[in-house]
Image (cartoon, grey):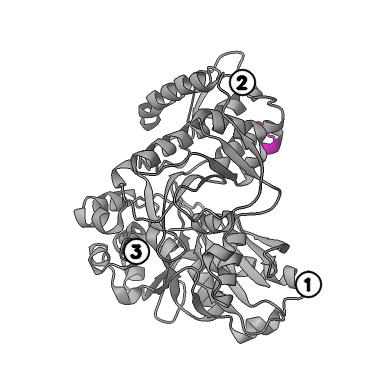
């Protein structure tokens, strides 16, 4: 058996699979986000440990974990966990959707070597500018930084005692030579950091250490290898079998992602596309990222006093776009704008704009932003002819039909099952424990159905998408 542990923003999910990759059980420990100031987003790393302990202990009460041989880790990317020489956490972790360091990010991005080495824009959410912000605003704490870890790698430190990261997550720091798959001394120096402050690096499917004996005893396990793991999107790709050139998915989680696997490193920072290492040796991936996907629907649901599923359940079949329009930049945006100060926007309201019209506008706005991502990916060299639909938002047939029609691509819906990051992490744990080849492990799920674009509405949504793009300057007003 094998465990996958996915450290998300809202919770830690633990998934148990058997040798045939059949899911045996899953548990989740809840997390909350603290926002002490505008544009800040933080969590206490101790809360990650408590949530992981709660999830694993619950799983151990219902399943015998003695046969577990490998654990894989997945997690929210870009977060900065600063440790002192004794391993103590110096401050709350600064998360991926924290934009306080947008000025520092712009300064680093203006250095030509940063894009050349990392293959990416230095986004405000990335790790390197967070440490520059600490140096300027918390100099006493910064002077004590001995190690910087990414969120899932802090869990690894607790699980194994090892300070290790892997290529996919490290790609989102701006400190990694993504082509060379190693830390860059030039990029580190540019950000005021040193190589000795970085964890060791392994591939995602390789061993990174072993579960500490006291934890193994607590959960009834023996000697368990812990794999390098992956950042959340790369882990999702492992779970969905999106590992070969031309394969891709659209993920409708808190954020939104259009993901394309590649056997080559294809940087195109001017497009604001992320070009990262994949979680398997010799592979890379590209992705466009929007910061508010399902989060935008949850925002509307909170305003209207409803549940997100209630909003989408009443929409019926796909309709032509209405006059109401929504720009989903509630937390700024990455692809294609790289704009930390963009704001969400509702426009085109009339006296007849009701709850359903607002819901359609929000879904359309997020989908138009995903279409911008697809355009950017194609400009960066990605070649996709279909997208697997993943994430909580993929439960809405209306939204999937909207995505297929707006992106003018077939959307593939997998058969029932969880192919997300925790499952992908468990697959990496399997490979680390057994040495199995990725081709043996990373199969795509069976497809339940294909959702084709509605040819009668493609032109209407293309026209509405053009109006959406024209509204962007108003989001910065």
Is residue 130 rendered magenta in the image? no
Label 2 sits on a secondary structure element that is loop
Gap between marks 1 and 2 measured at Cα: 48 Å
Label 3 sits on a secondary structure element that is loop
Point out which mark residue 319 bears: 2
Furthest residue toward right? 62
Point out which mark residue 61 bears: 1
**Is residue 323 toward the left or the right of residue 372 in the image?**
right
- Image coordinates of residue 78 in percent, x first then y, are 43, 58
Residue pictured at 62% horizontal, 54% vertical: 419
Region in magenta: 303-309
Does 92 appear above or below 371? below
- Which quadrant: the N terminus? bottom right
- Image coordinates of residue 326 in percent, x first then y, are 50, 28
Point out which mark residue 138 bears: 3
- Dot 1 or dot 2, earlier in sequence: 1
**Is residue 332 toward the left or the right of residue 220 in the image?**
left
**Residue 295 visible from this viewpoint:** no
Quadrant of the rendered structure where residue 139 is?
A: bottom left
Looking at the picture, tell me which residue is in the foreground, 14 or 457: 457
Residue pictured at 60% horizontal, 35% vertical: 400
């Amino acid at each position: 058996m094998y465990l996958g542990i996915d450290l998300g923003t809202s919770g830690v999910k633990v998934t148990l699979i058997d040798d045939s990759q059949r899911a045996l059980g899953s548990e989740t420990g809840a997390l909350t986000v603290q926002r002490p100031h505008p544009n800040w987003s933080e969590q206490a790393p101790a809360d990650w440990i408590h949530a992981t302990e709660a999830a694993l202990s619950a799983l151990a009460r219902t399943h015998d974990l003695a046969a577990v041989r490998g654990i894989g880790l997945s997690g929210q990317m870009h977060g900065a966990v600063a440790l002192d020489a004794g391993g103590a956490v110096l401050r709350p972790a600064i998360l991926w959707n924290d934009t306080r360091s947008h000025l520092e990010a712009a300064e680093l991005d203006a250095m030509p070597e940063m894009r050349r080495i990392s293959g990416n824009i230095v986004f405000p959410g990335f790790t390197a500018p967070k440490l520059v912000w600490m140096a300027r605003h918390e100099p006493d704490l910064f002077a004590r930084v001995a190690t910087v870890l990414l969120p899932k790698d802090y869990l690894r430190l607790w699980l194994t005692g090892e300070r290790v990261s892997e290529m996919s997550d490290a790609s989102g720091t701006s400190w990694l030579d993504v082509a060379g798959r190693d830390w860059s001394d030039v990029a580190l120096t540019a950000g005021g950091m040193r190589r000795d402050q970085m964890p060791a690096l392994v591939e995602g499917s390789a061993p990174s250490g072993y579960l500490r004996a006291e934890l193994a005893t607590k959960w009834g396990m023996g000697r368990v290898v812990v794999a390098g793991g992956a950042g959340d999107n790369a882990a999702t790709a492992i779970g969905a079998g999106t590992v070969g050139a031309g394969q891709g998915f659209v993920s409708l989680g808190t954020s939104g992602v259009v993901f394309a696997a590649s056997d080559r490193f294809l940087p195109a920072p001017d497009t604001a596309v992320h070009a990262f290492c994949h979680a398997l040796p010799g592979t890379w991936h590209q992705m466009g990222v929007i910061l508010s996907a399902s989060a935008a629907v949850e925002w509307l649901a909170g305003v209207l006093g409803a549940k997100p599923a209630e909003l989408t359940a009443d929409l019926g079949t796909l309709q032509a776009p209405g006059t109401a329009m929504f720009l989903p930049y509630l937390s700024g945006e990455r692809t294609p704008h790289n704009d930390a100060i963009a704001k969400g926007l509702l426009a085109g309201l009339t006296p007849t704009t009701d709850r359903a019209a607002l819901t359609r506008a929000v879904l359309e706005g997020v989908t138009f932003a995903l279409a911008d991502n697809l355009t950017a990916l194609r400009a960066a060299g990605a070649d996709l002819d279909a997208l697997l639909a993943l994430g909580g938002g993929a439960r809405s047939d209306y939204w999937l039909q909207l995505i297929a029609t707006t992106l003018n691509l077939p959307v593939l819906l997998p058969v029932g099952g969880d192919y997300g990051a925790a499952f992908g992490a468990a697959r990496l744990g399997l490979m680390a424990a057994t040495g199995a080849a990725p081709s043996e492990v990373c199969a795509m799920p069976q497809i339940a159905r294909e959702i084709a674009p509605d040819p009668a509405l493609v032109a209407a949504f293309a026209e509405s998408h053009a109006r959406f793009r024209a509204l962007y300057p108003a989001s910065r007003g």
